[in-house]
Image (spheres, rainbow, N blue to C red):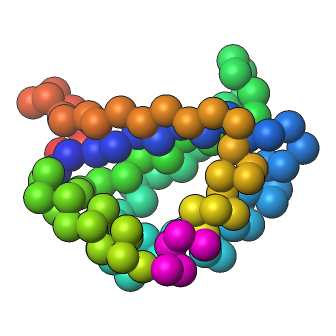
């Protein structure tokens, strides 16, 4: 498995709206295309108004297939537009577990 950590700095006052868009639009489409949400967190100490997602993929090919399918899906483009209006800053990182990781 490989993992992508996606960190979103949410426009102040828009957290509830972002979570609704994520739950009703982004997550169902992601699930349909085979992307796995491993976890999601809100930052309560540090950089506030931040959400961190951890997405799991079988391997780099799985991630590439997801990205290609997502790019061809008009519904995903609409959901992404809705999210972008609520996000001030985004950062993503590709992470590969070590032998010591509890998540493989």
Q: Name the one closer to the observer, 88 or 35.
A: 88
Residue 74 place in picture, x, y as percent: 49, 80
State the quadrant of the C terminus.
top left
72 with respect to 79 (left or right): left
Q: Is residue 34 above or below residue 50?
A: below
Question: Magenta part of the protein: which range?
Answer: 74-78
The answer to whether residue 22 of the structure is visible from this angle is no
Residue 63 place in picture, x, y as percent: 23, 57
The answer to whether residue 95 of the structure is visible from this angle is yes
Seen at 42% across and 46% down, the residue is 54
Seen at 42% across and 71% down, the residue is 30
Seen at 70% across and 21% down, the residue is 47
Residue 47 painted magenta: no
Q: Is residue 52 above or below residue 15?
A: above
Residue 76 painted magenta: yes
- The quadrant in which residue 64 appears is bottom left
Seen at 80% across and 60% down, the residue is 17
């Amino acid at each position: 498995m490989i993992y992508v950590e996606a960190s979103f700095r949410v426009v102040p006052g828009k957290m509830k709206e972002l979570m609704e868009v994520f739950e009703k639009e982004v997550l169902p489409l992601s699930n349909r295309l085979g992307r796995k949400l491993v976890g999601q967190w809100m930052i309560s100490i540090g950089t506030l108004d931040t959400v961190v997602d951890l997405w799991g993929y079988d391997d780099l090919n799985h991630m590439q297939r997801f990205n290609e399918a997502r790019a061809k899906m008009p519904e995903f483009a609409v959901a992404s537009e809705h999210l972008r209006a609520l996000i001030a800053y985004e950062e993503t990182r590709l992470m590969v577990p070590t032998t010591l990781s509890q998540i493989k």
